[in-house]
Image (cartoon, helix red, strand yellow):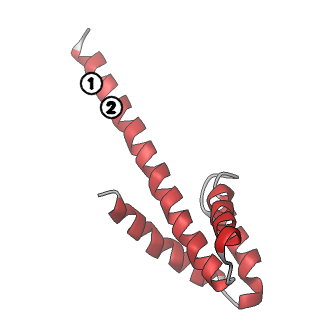
Amino acid sequence: MSSFDDRKKVYEKKFVTDEELKFKVSSRRNRYLGEWAAGILQLKDEKHSEYVQSVVKADLEEAGDEDVIRKLKEDLENYHITEEEIRKKITEFNQKAQADFQ
């Protein structure tokens, strides 16, 4: 095996590891978002847990954050939570989730 092949395998492994970390951070961030929104919605027990899972699953609909933002905007519409506030929470919880994995 050549050194080129070795380097290629190292880069491929790093790419996979980086993508796995991004997915874990994103999932954790979405869990935090779900917890935050469930608190605003005053959900308890099983409804709370189900809602948090629904926020995590919403992120699997399309690439990027727009699917999660859309869900939270719709769910929190009657609570006067703006898209700007949701985006700020995404940033805040993304930083928190990244710190969880360091």
Q: Within 10 Å of the Cα at label 1, are there few (<14), some (14-19), or many (20+) other Cα atoms?
A: few
On the rendered structure, is 55 left or right of 4?
Answer: right
Relative to residue 10, is residue 74 drawn left or right? right
Circle 2: residue type: Tyr
- Which quadrant would residue 20 be assigned to in this image? top left
Along the line of sight, the residue nearer the viewer: 63 or 25: 25
Dot 2 lies on which element? helix
Q: Which of 96 and 49 is in front in this view?
A: 49
Query: Where does the image place residue 89, in percent across and percent down from the top left?
Result: 52, 77
Q: In which quarter of the image is residue 57?
A: bottom right
Q: Left of 63 or right of it: where is 89?
A: left
Name the residue carrying label 2: 11
Residue 75 against residue 46 in the figure, above or below: below
From the top left corner, tell me how far across and down residue 62 is, in percent.
68, 52
Q: Mark 1 points at which residue?
A: 7
Residue 97: x and y in percent read 41, 64
Residue that lies at the very extreme toward the top in this rendered image: 1
CA neighbours of label 2 inside 10 A, class few (<14), some (14 to 19), many (20+): few
Quadrant containing the N terminus is top left
The residue located at (52%, 72%) in the rendering is 90
List the single residue furthest toward the bottom.
80
| Residue shown at 34% from the left, 36% from the top | 14
Helix, strand or loop under label 1: helix
What amino acid does circle 1 point to? Answer: Arg
